Amino acid sequence: MNYIINATSIVFFFENKPVKVEKTAPEYTRILSAFDLPSGQQEEVINAILNEKVGEYEKDGFTISPDEVSYKGETLPDVLANKVRDIASEGLPVKLFANFWENLNNNPSASSVRELYDFLAYKELPITEDGFFLAYKGVASNGLSVCGNVKTKVLQGIVDGNGKIQNNVGDTIEVKRWDVDDNRDNGCSFGLHVGSMDYATTWGEKTLVVKINPADVVSVPTDCSCQKCRVSKYEVIDSYENEIKSAITDSEGNPMESVEAAEYEDFLRSIDQFCIEQMNEGLRYLRVRAIQEMGDFEERPSRVRVLDGLSELGYYWDKDSDGEYVVDLND
């Protein structure tokens, strides 16, 4: 298999065309892991990964291509198709998306479903493994909602005399669905509001991460570039610290990681620890072959994978006068 690898990417010649995989791409670690396989198996595995990137394939009931994604014969809208592609490229099972699709189909309003696509398109807010999606909510410093409505019937949640609802981590807040305005042309109106990170952080003194069932979405107002969403129910799962950029998270909002990605982190830690130990023993130059043969690995990693790991960790490596790859531990 022909390829060119450098500090930022790897380029393969797949079906007579160059296919570039950036180091930041989710499938990059999966490709590197393939180099640890016997030489006769590497090309088949790498070709399968590249085909997921540029070709059409079927997985867990989904038909996925660069042009469209369908599930059980039904073509998904672009924003949801992109989410499926992101999940697949990260090496995670796309069947996790089926839970979201089922919940979405339980929404009683066709217009609510269509409007939700506009909201989810903004920076592709992540979905959870149990079929919900994550968004953000701005509240007062004491956790109360910024605005209140005494006429709203609150089914779950603590309400003060002004109709403001307390939002603590772990709380589930729910109002009657007909107490949520379903007219998207009304910007500021009644109902529970959630939003994108950019929107929520400008609304209130404190920002929370909330989890919403797509069945509970009522409307997405057209003002604020569709960055806010009115719902009848949400769960407060965390205080905001950093925007969640993963395509999918677990049910508690923690980013999910493929087996390959987790193994790669362990792989880097082992290499780094070994290099530090050798440096502390006074060694200046370390042969890459010694890293490949260290006892921390169940199977001997390929030289390609080790060199990539060293580059990722910031170590300088080159060939010595004998043609051996070595790492300069003092550089």
Image (cartoon, rainbow, N blue to C red):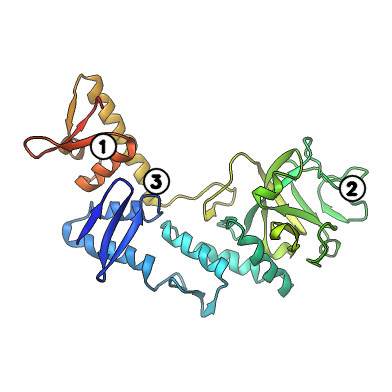
User: In this rendering, is residue 181 above or below 291?
Assistant: below
Q: Earlier in the sequence, mark 2 or mark 3?
A: 2
Amino acid at the residue labelled 3:
Ala
Helix, strand or loop status at disc 3 = helix
For disc 2, the marked residue is 163
Image check: 87 left or right of 128? left
For disc 1, the marked residue is 296
The residue positioned 75% from the left and 45% from the top of the image is 203
**Quick one: 35 or 159, which is closer to the camera?**
35
**Quick one: 99 or 329, which is closer to the camera?**
329
On residue 315, the disc is: none
Q: Position of residue 182 (x, y in %)?
A: 80, 67
For disc 3, the marked residue is 262
Q: Earlier in the sequence, mark 1 or mark 3?
A: 3
User: In this rendering, is residue 188 above or below 16?
Assistant: above
Q: CA distance from mark 2 to mark 3?
A: 46 Å
Is residue 152 visible to us here? Answer: yes
Helix, strand or loop status at disc 1 = loop
Q: Position of residue 184 (x, y in %)?
A: 78, 66
Image check: 284 left or right of 27? left
**Quick one: 78 or 144, which is closer to the camera?**
78
Res. 76 image quadrant: bottom right
User: Given contact means CB atoms under 8 Å apart, are the residues at marks 1 and 3 in contact?
Assistant: no
Q: CA distance from mark 1 to mark 3?
A: 15 Å
The local crowd at label 2, few if under 14, some if 14 to 19, many if 20 or more residues have their Cα within 10 Å, is: some
Q: CA distance from mark 1 to mark 2?
A: 59 Å
User: Given contact means CB atoms under 8 Å apart, are the residues at marks 2 and 3 in contact?
Assistant: no
